[in-house]
Amino acid sequence: MKIKEIIVVEGKDDTTAIKRAIGADTIETNGSAISEETLKRIAHAQEKRGVIVFTDPDYPGRRIRAIIEERIPSVKHAFLSKEKTIAKNGKGLGIEHASDEDIREALKNVYTPNINNNFEELITLDDLMQAKLIGHPQSKQRRSRLGELLNIGMTNGKQLHKRLVMFQITVEQFGQAIAQLDQEDQNV
């Protein structure tokens, strides 16, 4: 698997995992207090080769992703679920703990945001409510699982709607994921 883009990760251990899994180049943010210098390097990398943001599925990782996305909206995104990033000893969470296969799979399912602002709202807030993704006691768990199924990461309700629009998730993709969620709920 060859990737021309530079992958933005949080730290040295993530870089080691990426190099082991696919041998791609990385930029490390060195934590969620992402510096102006690092943002400039990411912007330059985006101009030259493109960038894939691949941060941990936790609050600091989501914060880094949001900061980069606000500054450089055209970056691509790769996501892994929390379950695939938990350390073998159960203490710690991060890309560095993911298997090589899971890293490769996440990078095959990269999303490119539609930044031309000509995107269509295919899935509405009403659809999210009907699918029990907002305003329901099980919403958080359902959003977490939907994020795994669609490879768009864990979100709150507002972020979910934004990502569905930004990544132009189709009604069919959404419907298939909801059907799987409903099926899994019946089997519990």
Image (tube, grey):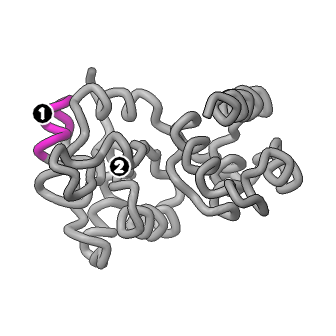
Q: Tell me the tag on residue 7.
A: none
For label 2, the SS is loop
Q: Which one is in front, 72 or 47? A: 72
Q: Nearer the viewer, residue 83 or 41?
A: 83
Residue 22 lies in magenta, yes or no? Answer: yes
Which residue is the extreme one toward the front? 188
Give residue 54's mark. Answer: 2
Q: Earlier in the sequence, mark 2 or mark 1?
A: 1
- SS of the residue at dot 1? helix
Q: Which mark is residue 20?
A: 1
Q: Up-down: is 11 above or below 24?
A: below
Query: Looking at the rendering, which quadrant does residue 23 occupy?
Result: top left
Quarter in which the C terminus is drawn: top right
Residue occupying the far top of the picture: 1
- The Cα–Cα distance between marks 2 and 1, rounded to whole angstroms, is 15 Å
Q: Is residue 187 left or right of residue 37?
A: right
Query: Residue 129 is drawn in which quadrant?
Result: bottom right
Instruction: Work out whether 125 lies above or below 59.
Output: above
**x%, y% of residue 2?**
26, 24
Please report the residue visible at 68 percent of the width from the left and 47 percent of the height from the top.
164
Residue at the (61%, 42%) spot, across then down:
146
Q: Is residue 173 visible?
A: no
Residue type at numbered disc 2: Phe
- Quarter the N terminus occupies: top left
Q: Quadrant of residue 37?
A: bottom left
Q: Residues within 10 Å of mark 1 (few under 14, many from 20)?
A: few
Q: As shown in the figure, which amino acid type bears the numbered disc 1? A: Arg
Q: Inspect the magenta stretch and tell me whether residue 164 lies in it.
A: no
Q: State whether the magenta stretch is mostly helix, strand or loop.
A: helix
Which region shows up in magenta?
Answer: 16-24
- Residue 87, percent from left and from top: 20, 48
What percent of the width, then of the height, locates residue 8? 29, 53
